């Protein structure tokens, strides 16, 4: 019985899915099933209760799973300690994040990290926010980056940075031509383009409207920042978005970025990892890099005030 067998089994238990365990470990679904049966043969007992419709362990299976977790934790800790002894910073870091962070916040940090540690590979997947949390819980990725992090007993959330929220309009919009900061109340009656209702930034914007007693019903809703920006660029409405996501369009003149008068609405960002997980030297260096102040990672243009 090899350590990889315990890893596949633990992933199977935690995801309750043969297909997800297969994807995490880069093997086929049938291989996961074969390994599970091989473990049952090795231990001479059933580990999975196949009489149930939903995935469920037997009492013996639960015992094997608990031991597997301990073995895997000890193994990861040993690997990390050996790397530290050799002063080696290498391996692969898997990251799941939402589009707005992955496209507009993360690149300068990854560039700096890969410059400092060229032996490390970084893989980034774009996911909806709720799926980032699932990926962390299922050990599909090492880190997640999200906006407006929510508390979870199995997930550690490390503050990354705060984004300023700004109003964006078409350059010929009346507010853009007037310039200067805008009152939030001036948005009443405007065509508003929003994110999908389940996206954290949309929930935060809705909260801002409620607290300021502004009745705002979006004329369009999209699941990503790029489509929201395109809709504003063709003058279908206005939107509230993270400032870092519209720097290029503002500089090119395809969008007008406006600050809010006497208000500073922010979007907190956080790095997620599973609690109790052994962090390799490369992972710790990556967290250190995200804590740096990089010139390319901060907004260089101030919205009109």
Image (cartoon, rainbow, N blue to C red):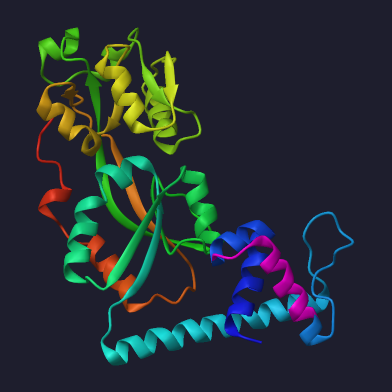
Q: From the viewer's perspective, tell me whether residue 272 is left or right of residue 138.
A: left
Write down the quadrant of residue 144 in the picture: bottom left
Instruction: Using the rendered image of the protein, determine whether residue 153 is visible from the camera's viewpoint.
Output: no
Residue most extreme to the right: 51
Q: So how many labels did they put on this image?
A: 0
Q: In the rendered image of this protein, does residue 295 appear above or below residue 90?
A: above
Where residue 60 appears, as percent x and y from the top left, is 80, 79
Does the magenta segment cover residue 35? yes
Which residues fall within the magenta stretch?
A: 26-40
- Which residue does the image show at 32% across and 47% down from the upper left? 102
- Which residue does the image show at 19% across and 53% down from the upper left? 108
- What main secondary structure does the magenta stretch of the protein show? helix
Does the magenta segment cover residue 290? no
Where residue 176 appears, as percent x and y from the top left, is 15, 14
* Image quadrant where one finds the N terminus: bottom right
Where residue 37 appears, as percent x and y from the top left, is 77, 74
Q: In the rendered image of this protein, does residue 57 appear above or below residue 129?
A: below
Write down the quadrant of residue 282 in the picture: bottom left
- Which residue does the image show at 28% across and 91% down from the upper left? 86
Q: From the viewer's perspective, tell me whether residue 108 is left or right of residue 241.
A: left
Where residue 162 appears, as percent x and y from the top left, is 26, 46
Q: From the viewer's perspective, tell me whether residue 279 is left or right of residue 115.
A: right
* Image quadrant where one finds the C terminus: top left
Instruction: Using the rendered image of the protein, determine whether residue 151 is visible from the camera's viewpoint.
Output: yes
Q: In the rendered image of this protein, does residue 10 appear above or below residue 161?
A: below
Write down the quadrant of residue 285 in the picture: bottom left
């Amino acid at each position: 019985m090899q350590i990889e067998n315990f890893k596949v089994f633990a992933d199977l238990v935690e995801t309750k899915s043969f297909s997800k365990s297969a994807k995490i470990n880069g093997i086929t679904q049938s291989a996961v099933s074969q390994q599970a049966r091989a473990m049952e043969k090795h231990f001479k007992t059933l580990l999975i209760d196949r009489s149930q419709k939903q995935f469920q362990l037997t009492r013996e299976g639960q015992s094997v799973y608990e031991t597997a977790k301990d073995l895997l934790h000890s193994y990861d800790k040993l690997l990390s300690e050996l790397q530290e002894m050799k002063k080696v910073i290498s391996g692969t870091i898997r990251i799941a994040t939402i589009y707005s962070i992955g496209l507009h916040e993360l690149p300068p940090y990854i560039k700096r990290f890969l410059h400092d540690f060229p032996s490390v590979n970084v893989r980034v997947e774009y996911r909806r926010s709720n799926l980032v949390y699932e990926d962390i819980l299922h050990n599909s990725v090492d880190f997640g980056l999200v906006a407006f992090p929510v508390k979870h007993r199995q997930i550690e959330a490390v503050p990354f940075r705060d984004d300023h929220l700004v109003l964006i309009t078409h350059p010929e919009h009346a507010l853009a031509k007037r310039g200067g900061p805008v009152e939030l109340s001036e948005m009443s009656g405007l065509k508003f383009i929003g994110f999908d209702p389940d996206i954290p930034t949309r929930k935060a914007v809705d909260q801002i409207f409620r607290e300021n007693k502004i009745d705002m019903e979006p004329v369009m809703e999209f699941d990503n920042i790029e489509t929201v920006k395109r809709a504003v660029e063709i003058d279908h409405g206005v939107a509230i978005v993270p400032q870092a996501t519209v720097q290029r369009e503002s500089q090119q003149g395809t969008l007008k970025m406006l600050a809010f008068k006497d208000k500073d609405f922010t979007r907190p960002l956080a790095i997620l990892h599973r609690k109790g997980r052994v962090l390799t030297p490369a992972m710790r260096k990556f967290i250190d890099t995200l804590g740096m102040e990089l010139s390319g990672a901060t907004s260089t243009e101030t919205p009109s005030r």
